[in-house]
């Protein structure tokens, strides 16, 4: 008794420590689950863009219902409220031109920023041409915008600066605000202050937008209007909500089912409580281990817990059902080796995932591996001390005996099984081209209808999706900007040739200091400039006497020197620069230059080869995000195939060493492989497109399903099966099927795929093992 | 020369006012009946900051009801297209598109011509008070902006013409600068 108390206290202490660690763990539901742990340069650009890029901070809002004027009124009111909120850095609805607010800053630094400034600009000829051009502009309808600046900026530098930023495509406008293509929705585009990777910040921004919208329609009395939000932040928040609600839902379903089955079999709450110990210990230890190794625990990993408990509870089931008959020592001697072998095959299966460069997958592997081993250890070393020998399950009912009799006949089904297996095999061979879904989006929690809404809103707003990027990595800000400027020259030529529609560069807002100095050095001294102006404007309608403000501003710029990033603080331009020019953790600077396809280009594509060739040797790298995603995914798949094969081979090797019989090994393997074939055929028939996680599921069928085959194999090894062992196997299978089957209810594709593969797989493995592994007549 | 012609119209319109049974409704109906087409224009800008007026000229192409293209040929090529809600410019291979309704100044300047050309009284009266002088042969339509966003920029637009043909437009800006556009239709071949 004293020993039992000590063991229990020790167990409790470990559990408490575990709870403390879990309590202080960082949980994450963001996209980093899918992002490579050892990214290539291109992939690093991808990750950076997804987590902190400008596009990851964009949210699109649409307002529908009511009349066009009413929608416009709501849009204006909403813009005003959102613009006042600290959650947003910019709110656009088409009311004001994009750069209206930034015009003052651009005007102040026009001599540092204008690409037109060269020494020639300030010669008599250069001035002549620039001023004549500006005067001509005065006859243009947009003259009103520039007339106030005429005497300060007769060479039209502001226009040169602003001209660089004008996007080619503008959203539709209805009643003065942006609208969808069909005019039925008012559209807004907001940029959050929070980074894309900051899910809390995104959630706050979205919640405050919804709240503002409620207030607006309340005050406008327009209850018939509805708002829709889309964008990366929205999806991130939604994924988190989904996973959060599912973790507890799945856990309760799985737990409820398992507890129900155990109560029915044990008929003793005390036994049930003991039976839950190993699995709870395993689930907790899994999270603790992941938290300590990775620092961050993914929500999906925790969600996998509902499957793990179905697997981890098995060991206690074997223990309780089998010891009653055998006694503890006999159980340890006769059955523990089989249970241990099952634990080892499961360990090999989950262990193979540890080597994946897909962080989510390796975390799942570590979690399940730790859980299974812990549950087995607790069963082996803690339960016997606590429960003793007197605790056990009553003699199984007569139905188990009937089942055993049936089992003795199952070998008669062998030919039927082979026939069905052949059918399934031929079917899969014929369908081999349609089996797989070669897209990372198959793993995303974003539904197709939501993705369609997102695409529609993006088209309506002509919002960038940042598929194509040019990235630069340099050791300091200045050289990063200088490379960006050189690349810009090359890109300008491509724009001119119509190969690409346009691009953004941080060097437009923050030119390199070298470039700024060159520009400022082009401005002549005051007396020289005045003399040249006199000479230039002899016959011009604009007389030189009126241009004193110009001369003064140009001199002031020359004296003020270069503009720095800090000079942009407080304006949306600062954010624009920061989203394209970032300081990495390694102390190096990186530049992201989004490219736009030529308007109307087929499939909004960019001539990839031309760009790669153009940028060759420039120090910049062209990245196509979609291609990178596809490459990333196919890399994961290739790797998963290799790891699954390696895991499978390791299991085969383990079984070969332990079983020491080619015949028995082949029987077990045959049962397992036919199970995999059968499950895949059924999934495909059910219309499921297979992806990476189904593949992992197949490995787990082998790893988990082998546990049941091994008990039948014991009979083939000359140790006949009794009713207690059969009952324990049946219960263990049912709990595993419940555990993994629960995952099949999940709306998270990663969990669902494993669930629908392994759940039915465990059951089928048991049935096929009964037919193929269990010897005829039980001997 | 053009200016004399303009004064003549003004005088004419004054002298014919007594007979005026011609009202805005009729004028709008006449204008709405215009089938569109090409016209030559000469535009002069008088700015306080400039010692001399700036002159430009080119062609205007109107396709009823909502597309107006103004192609300036001199002193340099510039194309301005007003199509539905979008105003776009092209100059030196550089394109600029702006949403019309987001800019009251653009609205004041260009939409007024288009609404006049299409005889859209409702659109005009949203932003202006209209006053008509003359008869269908020689009419003068004076438009005074009512919206504060426009009044800060513009005092008045005076459009004159004959039957369904607009001949002359004058913008008087709030700061006293003004511009005049004379329009001469090009007969269809």
Image (cartoon, coloured by chain):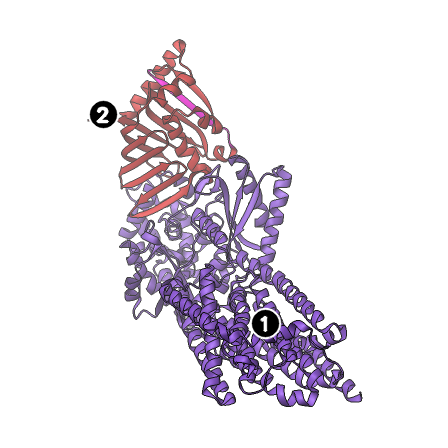
Front in this rendered view, residue B78 or A87: A87
Magenta range is: B137-147
Relative image position of residue A379 (x, y in whole percent): 67, 82
Residue shown at the point (52%, 65%) measured from the top left: A756
Which of the 4 image quadrants contains residue A316?
bottom right
- In the displayed image of the protein, which residue is found farthest to the right? A2
Q: Decide whether residue A9 is among the magenta residues.
A: no
Q: Which residue is under mark 1?
A: A297
Q: Chain under label 2? A: B
Colour in which chain A is drawn: purple
Colour in which chain B is drawn: red
Relative image position of residue A84 (x, y in whole percent): 59, 50
- Kindly state the secondary structure of the residue where label 1 is placed: strand
Q: Which residue is under mark 2?
A: B187
Q: Nearer the viewer, mark 1 or mark 2?
A: 1
Whether residue A670 is situated above or below residue A657 in the rendered picture: above
Q: Can residue A294 be seen in this view?
A: no
Front in this rendered view, residue A37 or A705: A705
- In the displayed image of the protein, which residue is found farthest to the top? B19
Q: Chain under label 1? A: A
Q: Distance between the residues labelled 1 and 2?
A: 78 Å
- Kindly state the secondary structure of the residue where label 2 is placed: loop
Front in this rendered view, residue A247 or A291: A247
Whether residue A95 is situated above or below residue A85 in the rendered picture: above
Relative image position of residue A129 (x, y in whole percent): 28, 48
């Amino acid at each position: 008794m004293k020993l039992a108390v000590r063991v229990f206290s020790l167990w409790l202490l470990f559990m408490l420590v575990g709870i403390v660690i879990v309590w202080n763990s960082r949980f994450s539901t963001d996209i980093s689950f899918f992002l490579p742990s050892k990214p290539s340069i291109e992939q690093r650009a991808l990750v950076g863009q997804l987590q902190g890029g400008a596009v990851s901070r964009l949210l699109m809002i649409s307002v529908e219902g009511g009349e066009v004027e009413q929608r416009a009124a709501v849009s204006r009111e909403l813009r005003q409220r959102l613009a006042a909120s600290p959650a947003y850095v910019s709110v656009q609805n088409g009311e004001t031109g994009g750069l209206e607010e930034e015009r003052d800053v651009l005007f102040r630094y026009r001599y540092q920023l204008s690409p037109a400034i060269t020494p020639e600009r300030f010669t008599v000829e250069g001035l002549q041409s620039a001023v004549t051009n500006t005067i001509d502009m005065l006859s243009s309808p947009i003259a009103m915008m520039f007339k106030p600046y005429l005497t300060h900026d007769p060479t039209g530098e502001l226009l040169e600066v602003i001209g660089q930023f004008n996007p080619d495509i503008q959203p539709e406008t209805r009643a003065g605000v942006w609208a969808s293509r069909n005019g039925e929705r008012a559209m807004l585009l907001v940029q959050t202050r929070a980074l894309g990777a900051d899910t809390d910040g995104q959630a706050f921004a979205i919640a405050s937008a919804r709240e503002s919208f409620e207030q607006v329609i309340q005050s406008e009395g327009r209850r018939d209007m509805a708002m829709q939000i889309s964008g990366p932040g929205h999806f991130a928040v939604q994924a988190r909500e989904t996973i959060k609600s599912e973790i507890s839902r799945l856990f309760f379903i799985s737990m409820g089912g398992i507890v129900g089955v155990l109560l029915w079999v044990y008929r003793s709450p005390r036994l049930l409580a003991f039976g839950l110990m190993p699995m709870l210990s395993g689930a907790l230890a899994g999270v603790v281990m992941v938290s300590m190794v990775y620092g961050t625990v993914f929500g999906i990993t925790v969600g996998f817990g509902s499957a793990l408990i179905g697997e981890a509870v098995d060991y206690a089931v074997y223990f309780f059902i089998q010891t009653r008959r055998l006694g503890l020592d006999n159980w340890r001697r006769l059955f523990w080796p089989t249970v241990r072998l099952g634990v080892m095959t499961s360990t090999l299966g989950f262990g193979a995932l540890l080597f994946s460069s897909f962080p989510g997958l390796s975390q799942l592997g570590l979690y399940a591996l730790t859980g299974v081993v812990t549950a087995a250890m607790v069963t082996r070393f803690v339960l016997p001390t606590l429960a003793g020998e007197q605790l056990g399950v009553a003699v199984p009912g007569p139905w188990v005996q009937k089942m055993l009799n049936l089992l003795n006949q199952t070998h008669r089904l062998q030919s039927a099984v082979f026939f069905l297996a052949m059918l399934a095999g031929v079917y899969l061979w014929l369908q081999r081209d349609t089996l797989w879904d070669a897209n990372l989006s198959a793993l995303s929690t974003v539904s197709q209808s939501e993705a369609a809404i997102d695409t529609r809103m993006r088209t309506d707003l002509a919002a960038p999706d940042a598929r194509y990027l040019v990235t630069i990595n340099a050791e300091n800000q200045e050289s990063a900007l200088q490379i960006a400027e050189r690349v810009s020259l090359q890109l300008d030529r491509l724009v001119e040739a119509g190969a690409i529609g346009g691009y953004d560069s941080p060097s437009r807002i923050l030119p390199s200091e070298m470039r700024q100095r060159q520009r400022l050095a082009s401005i002549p001294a005051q007396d020289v400039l005045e003399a040249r102006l006199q000479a230039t404007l002899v016959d011009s309608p604009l007389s030189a006497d009126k241009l004193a403000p110009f001369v003064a501003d140009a001199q002031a710029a020359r004296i003020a020197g270069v503009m720095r990033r800090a000079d942009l603080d407080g304006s949306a331009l600062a954010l624009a620069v920061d989203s394209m020019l970032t300081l990495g953790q390694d102390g190096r600077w990186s530049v992201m230059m989004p490219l736009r396809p030529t308007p109307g280009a087929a499939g909004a594509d960019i001539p990839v080869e031309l760009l790669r060739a153009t940028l060759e040797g420039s120090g910049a790298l062209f990245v196509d995000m979609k291609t990178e995603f596809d490459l990333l995914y196919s890399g994961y798949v290739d790797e998963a195939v290799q790891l699954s094969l390696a895991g499978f081979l390791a299991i085969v090797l383990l079984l070969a060493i332990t079983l020491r019989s080619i015949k028995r090994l082949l029987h077990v393997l045959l049962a397992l492989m036919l199970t995999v074939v059968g499950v895949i055929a059924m999934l495909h028939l059910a219309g499921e497109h297979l992806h990476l996680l189904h593949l992992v599921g197949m490995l787990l069928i082998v790893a988990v399903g082998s546990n049941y085959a091994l008990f039948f194999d014991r009979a083939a090894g000359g140790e006949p099966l009794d009713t207690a062992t059969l009952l324990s196997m049946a219960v263990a299978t049912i709990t595993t099927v419940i555990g993994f089957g629960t995952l099949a209810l999940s709306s998270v594709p990663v969990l669902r795929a494993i669930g629908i593969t392994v759940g039915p797989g465990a059951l089928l493995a048991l049935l096929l093992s009964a037919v193929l592994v269990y010897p005829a007549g039980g001997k | 020369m053009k200016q004399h012609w303009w004064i003549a119209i003004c005088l004419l319109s004054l002298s014919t006012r007594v007979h005026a049974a011609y009202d805005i409704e009729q004028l709008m109906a006449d204008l709405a009946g215009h089938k569109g087409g090409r016209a030559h224009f000469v535009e002069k800008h008088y700015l306080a900051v400039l010692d001399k007026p700036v002159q430009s000229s080119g062609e205007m192409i109107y396709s009823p009801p909502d597309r107006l293209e103004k192609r300036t040929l001199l002193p340099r090529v510039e194309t301005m297209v007003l199509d539905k809600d979008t105003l776009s410019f092209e100059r030196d291979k550089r394109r600029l598109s702006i949403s019309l309704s987001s800019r009251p100044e653009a609205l004041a300047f260009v939409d007024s011509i288009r609404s006049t050309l299409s005889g859209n009284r409702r659109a005009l009266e949203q932003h202006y008070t209209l006053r008509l002088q003359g008869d269908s042969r020689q009419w003068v339509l004076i438009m005074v902006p009512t919206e504060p966003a426009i009044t800060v920029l513009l005092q008045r637009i005076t459009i004159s013409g004959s039957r369904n043909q607009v001949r002359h437009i004058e913008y008087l800006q709030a700061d006293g600068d003004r511009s005049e556009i004379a329009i001469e239709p090009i007969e269809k071949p």
